[in-house]
Image (cartoon, rainbow, N blue to C red):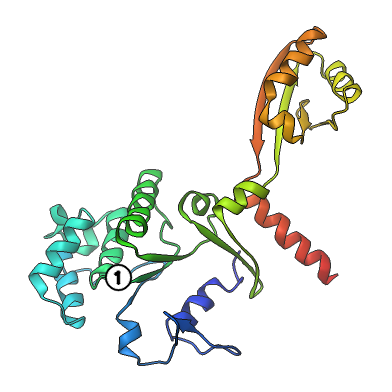
Amino acid sequence: MNGAGKTTTIRALLGMSKPSSGEVYLFGQRWENGNPNLSRRVGYMVEVPYAYPNFTVRENLSLMARLRGLPVPRAVNEIMEQLNLTQYADSKARDLSLGNAQKLGLAKALIHKPDVLILDEPTNALDPAGIVEIRVMLKALASQQGVTVFISSHILEEMSKMASRIGIIHKGVLLEELTTKDFETIRRKQLMIGAKDTRKAQAILSDSGYAVHSTSNNCLALPDDHAVKHPEHIAKLLAHHEVPLTMLNVEEENLEHYFLKVIGAQEGKRK
């Protein structure tokens, strides 16, 4: 959520602002401004990456390579090839699509081969195809090159597809940190049931010991682990009582719902 402290955390990680309390450690070392040994191991891209509009992609990257003390032609060519920007090498930054402008920002952040890549809303303003492309690229960086990718985002559904570890921040406090495997285990799952005769179906399920409740769209929700894992048993039970089904679907809580549940619980504690 806006104002949660995501960007402030990133600024502290980068040494751009001093924490009001506590200390920042990177790679097991205390972060201090002006430490080149740490800063050269970090790449960063802001939410709306800036490039010199009248410079070409190659010129923008060449400038960054020189600032980083890198061999210009080789470093530039390598990163353009890695991010599929070679065909746009001589295009001016102002003429790039949003997706390619975002890739240019990533290229500038990655040109020195950092160990940690810090990104603020990397998929902001991208179309669905652009979002998928960035997602695939970042996952490949992590899995194939061992880069740690730290992302600040409020697009939670996208993060659930991309991240291996998730932190929920609200009003400057880290409320929860969990792996995506943890989330898969603890998130709420329920069997959604549609039937020709909803009332009869509910009565049959209740009589069979299931804690079932109706929903606003005239369906039944069955938050039962056995039913979720074996929906065919529910189908067989209702068919035995001659109740035709119109729908049988497992519904899983998404990250957005889980996030709202966590911050809702936190707000409840404060009241």
Q: Secondary structure at mark 1?
A: helix
Query: Which residue appears at 35% of the width and 92% of the height?
Result: 34
Please name the residue shown 15% across and 77% down the image. Answer: 70
Residue at numbered disc 1 = 109
* Residue 56 is at least partly visible in this image: no
166 versus 42 height, above or below: above
Question: Residue 194: where, in percent of width, then height?
Answer: 73, 21
Residue 201 at x, y = what percent?
Answer: 83, 18
Q: How many marks?
A: 1
Taking 63 as reference, is 250 left or right?
right
Indicate the position of residue 191 as horizontal and vertical percent values. 71, 30
Instruction: Please tell me which residue is depicted at 42% across the width and 81% down the height of the picture.
Output: 14
Q: Would you say 111 lies left or right of 125 here?
A: left
Q: Position of residue 35 (x, y in %)?
A: 35, 91
Dividing the picture into quadrants, the one containing residue 147 is bottom left
Give the residue furthest to the left.
73
Left or right position of 73 against 35: left
Left or right: 258 in relation to 83? right
Depicted 167 relative to depicted 203: above or below? below
Q: Is residue 242 visible?
A: yes
Answer above or below: position of 187 versus 1. above
Quadrant in which the C terminus appears? bottom right
Q: How busy is the neighbourhood of tag 1: few (under 14 within 10 Å), some, or many (20 plus)?
A: many
Q: Amino acid at mark 1?
A: Ala
Question: Between 182 and 242, which is closer to the camera in this rendering?
Answer: 182
Give the camera-side residue of 129 and 237.
237
